[in-house]
Image (tube, rainbow, N blue to C red):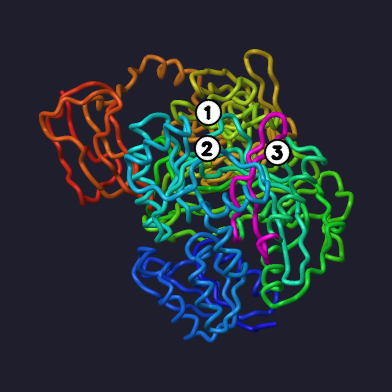
């Protein structure tokens, strides 16, 4: 076994690989750009080597710079993570020529399956059912429009060397095909150094299910079940789970065997993933093979007990798999939520800045891991695991140069319902401040009836949130729980204030028991009866709730129980109450005396300023181009300008017809959130 491994990546995946390297007794080497000098993966690694400026195409994906770092460090092996150079055959060739082990598949397998155009052809020749499309090179936007019409709208324009949702666009008409082609080429060039694009039919209402395979260089290959990845936004996965709530054992077996056969047909070694589209009748169609570790690999590890990174390293060392297909048992259920630095209230646009507060939920190891390193057949009832793969820390920066992922939060439990509930609590316990993030949206998904039923498709977000995410309206029962907890918390605060002011001592309880709680447009009159174990809160409609918890004023996280059911809330102080965030809702909860509540009802409502005649920048970014000029008449849906942020190009469009009266920015300008780009009459 080699003794030193370099991780040719950054962020959470670099940290993930370092953890396994440490477990195996290997020395780890990190590489970093100027922007990542203080990054977590640099701090975790045994050694770290600087490789260049922040843009990935000047640092992380420059093969010569990475090879120089390998030589400097004396690393005998390289793990590429995902993205960047992980599926670059030239990088694998350079490693082979230097006598350095590549923790991934052989060059030939990367060339055959890592390139999406080539892999489609091979799959078709091998008799694998594939989605209709055009796999040849596309010269320009005109040809893209022509091909799109031949295939039939809607179509998907995809980067040949792509992954992670980069370089992908859905087009429903000629204009979107033309715009999408150029945007996909630009993103592909910036992210992967390869701007080739292909087109395939976009299958509506599909499920995205993928098979994890693991092969060695001795002819052995196995599959480790499937992952359901249907919750996607802009073709980028947001929620994954294993196993799929849709597949039966026969379909799982057929997909797994086909995936292994395809991998072995191209001489594949290491961990890889074969992706399929599955229709409502459980017919499955090959999409592509990712010749690398997938972002969502933790859910497979949690239901199988197999450390995929360790297996990749051992295969790269020439070892045979010690796991057979019969050893693979899928135990329990695991769910992964991807926490992104993006603002769900602004169309999920990227957010950058400093993490002024970053407090993940406490990680908990699952109970049913047996002594031999494999999952026990029967997990004990109530066992729960919480895992958080991350590459950031409190006080660190979310950079504009890289993918906006902050963390991958995973839960495991014996059943899907228990895993979902564990995820709800974990999301509510996750504290992130300083940037926009998608925690509220993830919480909303975990509560959505379609997700809970397991009947989602890849169109879930598009169909359920057609106008974007505007927050969560909680049900009456949830509002009662929050109101009861808030009233009890307010009472604790009043007692402390009274003691500090000298109005009472520890033996007196002169704080009032009658309060009014206003939340989400509702008003509740409550009576609180407290004791040493908690408080009983009685509502004017007769509802009685028992609240317990150890919250004290100033705590930003309240872990409570209401009628013995958990309630976790992020708490902020506002005048006359609290800002409460829980289950995807962001609430202003006011707790007042009856007289204060009476007066509050007479207060006028503040009216928001009118910005309907302005185009505001929805996220920090760089102006790529302006598509209109002062005096132009624009139509609804017309592209006004293009903003680039975190390697993604975003076209800002007119919401209604109007005339441009003023433009405040030009190509090359850096803009902040809510900067006025242009004005209309």
Write down the residue under mark 2. Answer: 440
Crowd around label 3: few <14 · some 14–19 · many ≥20 (10 Å)? some
Write down the residue under mark 3. Answer: 421
* Foreground of the two, 554 or 344: 344
Residue 491 visible: no
Q: How far apart are marks 1 and 2 (CA)?
A: 8 Å
Kindly indicate whether the residue at mark 3 contacts the one at mark 2 (C-beta within 8 angstroms). Answer: no
Q: x, y (%) of residue 21?
A: 65, 74
Crowd around label 2: few <14 · some 14–19 · many ≥20 (10 Å)? many
Query: Does 377 lie within the magenta span?
Result: no
Image quadrant holding the N terminus, namely bottom right
Vertical comparison of 161 with 560: above or below: below
Q: x, y (%) of residue 319?
A: 75, 76
Q: Which mark is residue 472?
A: 1
Q: As drawn, is 225 to the left or to the right of 654?
A: right
Kindly indicate whether the residue at mark 2 contacts the one at mark 1 (C-beta within 8 angstroms). Answer: yes
Q: Read off the magenta span.
A: 265-292
In the image, what residue occupies the spot 44% across and 61% down?
396
Q: x, y (%) of residue 621?
A: 30, 48
């Amino acid at each position: 076994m080699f003794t030193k491994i370099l991780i040719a990546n950054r962020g959470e995946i670099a940290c993930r690989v370092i953890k396994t390297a440490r477990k195996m007794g290997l020395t780890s080497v990190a590489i970093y750009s100027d922007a990542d000098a203080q990054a977590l993966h640099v701090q975790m690694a045994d050694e770290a080597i600087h490789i260049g400026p922040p843009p990935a195409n000047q640092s992380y994906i420059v093969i010569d710079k990475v090879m120089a770092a390998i030589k400097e460090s004396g690393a005998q092996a390289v793990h590429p993570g995902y993205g960047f150079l992980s599926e670059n055959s030239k990088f694998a060739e350079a490693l082979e020529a230097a006598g350095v082990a590549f923790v991934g598949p052989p060059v030939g397998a990367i060339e055959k399956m890592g390139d999406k155009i080539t892999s489609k052809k091979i799959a078709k020749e091998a008799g694998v059912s594939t989605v209709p499309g055009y796999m040849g090179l596309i010269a320009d936007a005109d040809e893209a429009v022509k091909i799109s019409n031949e295939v039939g709208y809607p179509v998907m324009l995809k980067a040949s060397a792509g992954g992670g949702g980069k370089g992908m666009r859905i087009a429903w008409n000629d204009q979107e095909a033309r715009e999408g082609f150029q945007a996909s080429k630009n993103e592909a060039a910036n992210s992967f150094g390869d701007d080739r694009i292909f087109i395939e039919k976009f299958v509506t209402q599909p499920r995205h299910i993928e098979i994890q395979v693991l092969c060695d260089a001795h002819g052995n290959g196995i599959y480790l079940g499937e992952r359901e990845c249907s919750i996607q936004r802009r073709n980028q996965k947001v929620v994954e789970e294993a196993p799929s709530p849709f597949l039966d054992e026969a379909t799982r077996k057929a997909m797994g065997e086909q995936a292994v056969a395809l991998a072995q047909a191209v001489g594949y070694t290491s961990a890889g993933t074969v992706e399929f589209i599955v229709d409502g009748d459980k017919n499955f169609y090959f999409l592509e093979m990712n010749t690398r570790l997938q972002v969502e690999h933790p859910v497979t590890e949690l239901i199988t007990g197999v450390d995929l990174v360790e297996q990749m390293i051992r295969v790269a060392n020439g070892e045979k798999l010690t796991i057979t297909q019969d050893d693979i048992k899928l135990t329990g259920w695991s769910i992964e939520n991807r926490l992104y630095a993006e603002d769900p209230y602004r169309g999920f646009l990227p957010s950058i800045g400093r993490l002024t507060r970053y407090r993940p939920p406490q990680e908990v190891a699952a109970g049913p891991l047996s002594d031999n390193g494999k999952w026990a057949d029967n997990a004990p009832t109530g066992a729960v695991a919480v895992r958080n793969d991350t590459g950031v820390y409190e006080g660190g920066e979310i950079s504009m140069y890289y993918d906006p992922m902050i963390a991958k939060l995973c839960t495991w439990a014996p059943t899907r319902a228990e895993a979902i509930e564990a995820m709800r609590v974990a999301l509510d316990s996750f504290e992130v401040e300083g940037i926009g993030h998608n925690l509220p949206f993830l919480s909303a998904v975990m509560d959505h009836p379609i997700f809970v039923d397991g009947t989602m498709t890849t169109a879930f977000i598009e169909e359920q949130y057609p106008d974007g995410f505007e927050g969560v309206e909680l049900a009456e029962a949830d509002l009662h729980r929050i109101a009861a907890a808030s009233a009890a918390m307010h009472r604790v605060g009043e007692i402390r204030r009274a003691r500090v002011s000298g109005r009472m001592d520890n033996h007196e309880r002169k704080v009032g028991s009658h309060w009014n709680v206003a939340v989400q447009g509702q008003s509740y009159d409550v009576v609180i009866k407290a004791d040493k174990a908690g408080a009983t809160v009685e509502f004017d409609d007769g509802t009685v709730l028992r609240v317990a918890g150890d919250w004290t004023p100033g705590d930003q996280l309240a872990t409570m129980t209401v009628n013995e059911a958990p309630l976790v809330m992020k708490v902020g102080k506002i005048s006359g109450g609290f800002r409460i965030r829980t289950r995807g809702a962001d609430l202003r909860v006011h707790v007042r005396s009856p007289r204060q509540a009476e007066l509050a009802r007479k207060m006028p409502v503040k009216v928001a300023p009118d910005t309907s005649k302005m185009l505001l920048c929805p996220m920090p970014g760089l102006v790529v181009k302006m598509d209109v000029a002062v005096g132009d008449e624009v139509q609804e849906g017309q592209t006004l300008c293009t903003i680039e942020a975190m390697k993604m190009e975003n076209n800002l469009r007119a919401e209604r017809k109007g005339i441009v009266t003023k433009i405040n920015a030009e190509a090359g300008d850096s803009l902040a959130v809510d900067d006025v780009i242009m004005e209309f009459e």
